[in-house]
Image (tube, rainbow, N blue to C red):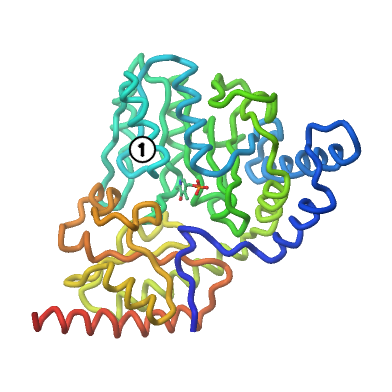
Amino acid sequence: MKVYLDNGATTMTDPKVVKTMLSYFTKNFGNASSLHSWGEEAKKALENSRKIVAKALNAKPSEIIFTSGGTESDNLAIKGIAFHHGKGHIITSKIEHPAVLRSCKALERKGFEITYLDVDEKGFVNIEELESCISRETILVSIMHANNEIGTIQEISEIGKICCEKGIVFHTDAVQSFTKVPIDVERVKVDLISMSSHKIHGPKGVGALYIREGTMIEKLSDGGGHEFELRAGTENVSGIVGFAKAVSLCSKAHIDYMKELRDRLISRVLEEIPNTHLNGAMDKRLCNNANFSFEGVEGEAVLFHLNLKGIATSTGSACSSRDTKPSHVLEAIGLKSELLSGSLRLTLSRFNTKEEIDYCVDVLKEVVGSLREMGDKT
Ligand SMILES: *Cc1c(COP(=O)(O)O)cnc(C)c1O
């Protein structure tokens, strides 16, 4: 059996998405800026896609900028706000994705002041602490919606309220939560939202940034006047159409289905494999995320043996999975060093089945058991 449980890293492109995209390579291949019928077709597809993505956030189409993915959206949001101001203070957390953390590090080298907030043992930032860090110099707060490693969903409504009261721009990286945890921008006071297509069964290399109307932001690349003068470069029309199709295919039923599989996985693993810990929160957790630490075994060894049995998982996040350094997220939630190296992330999708989950737990039991036995002998 082949079982893909690494949907936090990337997802299978839904065949319906591929089918929708195909005509935009060969038949409707026009440049959306061209004035002839080919261009008009492309432009129509582009603007229809913008409407679909906007609707998912209850935003206006003019507030959606298509980008090359979550990383570019994070860079544009953070550096775009920073460069508009030229100097200032930014608040973020220690468990952000590298696209956010390294953007902040880059700004730090340019003289911006950055506060990296601690999180508690479940991965939540302390809202009072965040509020107390805000100063007259603060220009931006960037806190992710759902964490990619442990699945913790932050209270972005609360954070947004505080930022709004103080007149500070609030960005959230919603790459993991988009279409899984609803955000209504009419109700949640968030100014910038990063999204990515390939985490929701769309194609890779495309994503979007929501920019609330009136937010002062500087573009990062110069060129044509595409995307409301904020993101130069011929639009990836086929990719954008695929992204929008992927958004339109997501449903509440999928969320409930994934949650059911996730809960089955978590309860079976915790019950049947002794000395196992669940990292992250149980409520306020992404519907498709499970992250375990197995005492006395290396997460990498488990991953390796699961892979031999056809099961794809991850230690930490994909971006850092070739590093041997422990995960910055697991360190930030204060995991003891022996648990840090024993962690394994399993991330589900709507294409997984109950049979796959049961197979995975059975193999996991066997693998962890035999690794522990081997460890005892050496
Ligand atoms: C995957 C991911 C990104 C990066 O998105 P890409 O489209 O791969 O560039 C950013 N933030 C989070 C939380 C992610 O999970």
Q: Is residue 277 left or right of residue 223?
A: left
The one of 5 and 357 positioned closer to us in this rendering: 5
Q: Quadrant of residue 308?
A: bottom left
Residue 374 drawn at (x, y percent): 16, 82
List x then y, in percent, for residue 261.
48, 72
Q: Pointer 1: what residue?
A: 101
Check the image and report above or below for 72 versus 19. Answer: above
What residue is shown at x 40% (from left), y 58% (from top)? 283
Left or right: where does residue 88 sit relative to residue 351?
A: left
Question: Mark 1 belongs to which amino acid?
Answer: Leu
Work out which residue is located at the far right of the displayed protein and give it.
37
Q: Is residue 73 above or below residue 294?
A: above
Q: Residue at x 22, y 62 (%)?
A: 341
Residue drawn at x 32%, y 18% is 111
The quadrant of the rendering that contains the C terminus is bottom left
Q: Residues within 10 Å of mark 1 (few under 14, many from 20)?
A: many
